[in-house]
Structure formats: C-alpha cells, structure tokens
Amino acid sequence: MLASTIDHIVIGANHLHIETARLENTLNAKFLGGGKHDLMATHNRLLKLQDSIYLEVIAIDPEAHPKTNVRRRHRWFSLDSKFTQERLARAAQPLTWVVAVPDIEAAKSKCDYDPGEIIEVSRDHLKWRLTVPTDGGLSEEGILPSLIEWPQGRNPAHLMTDSGVSLESLVVSHPEPKRISSLLENLNFDGPLKVITGTRSLSFHFLRTDGHVKVICKI
C-alpha cells in the first residue's frame, strides 16, 4: 500500500503581507519568505512546523497575471472563487491540506476521489508535481487533500528554520465522517488528523512555544 504523509496545510489570505503579520502575532512565530508562482499568479509565505510539515499562507499576487493556458483558466486553491474571496475578505483561514506521496499517478488512481489533474509547478529553484482541479476548485470543499510529489521526496521544510510551532491536529468536520475516513485510508498517510461529525469545515490547531493552543478555522 502507498505510504504518505501530511506535507503542508494551506491558509488563504486576501492580502499576503497583512495577514501574515497577523498570523505571526497569533502563532508567536516568524514566517519565512516564500516566493511567486508565475503559473498561477500567486505568492506565499511559509512556516515550518514539526518534522517535514509546513504551513503555507497564499494569496493572489496583485502584480502578476496567470499565464495564458487553454486548459487552465483558474488559479489553484479556489482563489478565483467569489465565495472564497468573500471569506478571505473577512479573515485569513484554512483552504485545504496537501499530502505528499511517492508516486502521484499511483496515489491518484487509488485514492477513490478526484483530486484534480497532475500539473508540474516551479518556484525559484523548487519544482514539484501537484493535483489541481481544472476549475481551480477544492476536493470536497478542501476537506479531501491535494496530492503532491517532490523530487527525491523532500519538500522545502528541510531548508527552513524551526519555528517552535507544531500542528497539534488537523480537524476535518463532515456530515459523512465514515465516508471521508474511508477515502483517506486509501492514502495510508501519517499525521495528526481527526475526522468528526458536523458541517463541512476544516480547522488547524497549533501548539505554540508558550504551550498555548491556537485554532484557525474556516468561517
């Protein structure tokens, strides 16, 4: 069976620098400089969590424009969605999460849901392969993860400075938790995940260096 791990969690922002500063205050940690994604006209900032997990804050880059592509007319992580934009105008919040797999084609064929098409992406010296729906949406509104494959299996977390912040739990709420759990079992992944019964939502629970737990949830 495929082995996989939580690679990173994704928080969307209306304005990258303003919301990153607010999250730094909330988490009592300093984010690292990320970069620009020319293909999607987005930019990000990163924070290393435990092991190889990291937090990505991502936003539309107002200085960039998506590259013309007849197959890809939308940015990833639903950032072009009016609904998402209205949410992010209120506050930065979770969009989805990403699972690292050793063979993205095999993982996509066995996960039993549609995570999107496999695309190749680069930023600065980094290159990776990621599943992204053609319409730029999110699988099960972000409840089900995107899949990612890194060359040599190493994501950029190994290059980041430890922040002292860890992901205590990633909590998925869904009206059909057994179905969601069954789908996730196909990925055979390891990580601090909880699936509970409720309306569709996603929340990230962080343990700060001072021992306080901070929760950032979808609103």
Image (tube, helix red, strand yellow):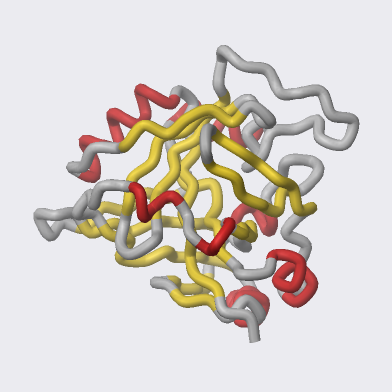
Q: Measured along the vertical axis of the image, is residue 16 above or below residue 194?
A: above
Tell which residue pokes out farthest to the left in this image. Answer: 210
* The one of 134 and 124 positioned closer to us in this rendering: 124
At which x and y percent is residue 7?
48, 60
* The one of 49 and 124 positioned closer to us in this rendering: 124
Q: Residue at coordinates 55% horizontally, 73% vertically from top-left?
A: 4
Q: Residue at coordinates 40% horizontally, 49% vertically from top-left?
A: 55
At which x and y percent is residue 173?
52, 65
Tell which residue pokes out farthest to the right in this image. Answer: 70
Q: Is residue 179 visible?
A: no
Horizontal relation, residue 184 to residue 163: left or right: right
Horizontal relation, residue 165 to residue 60: left or right: left
At which x and y percent is residue 182?
64, 82
Image quarter (top left, top right, bottom left or bottom right) of the N terminus? bottom right
Q: Residue at coordinates 40% horizontally, 59% vertically from top-left?
A: 53
Horizontal relation, residue 194 to residue 101: left or right: left
At which x and y percent is residue 44?
47, 33
Tell which residue pokes out farthest to the bottom in this image. Answer: 1
How many discs appear?
0
Q: Residue at coordinates 69% horizontally, 56% vertically from top-left?
A: 139
Q: Is residue 159 visible?
A: yes
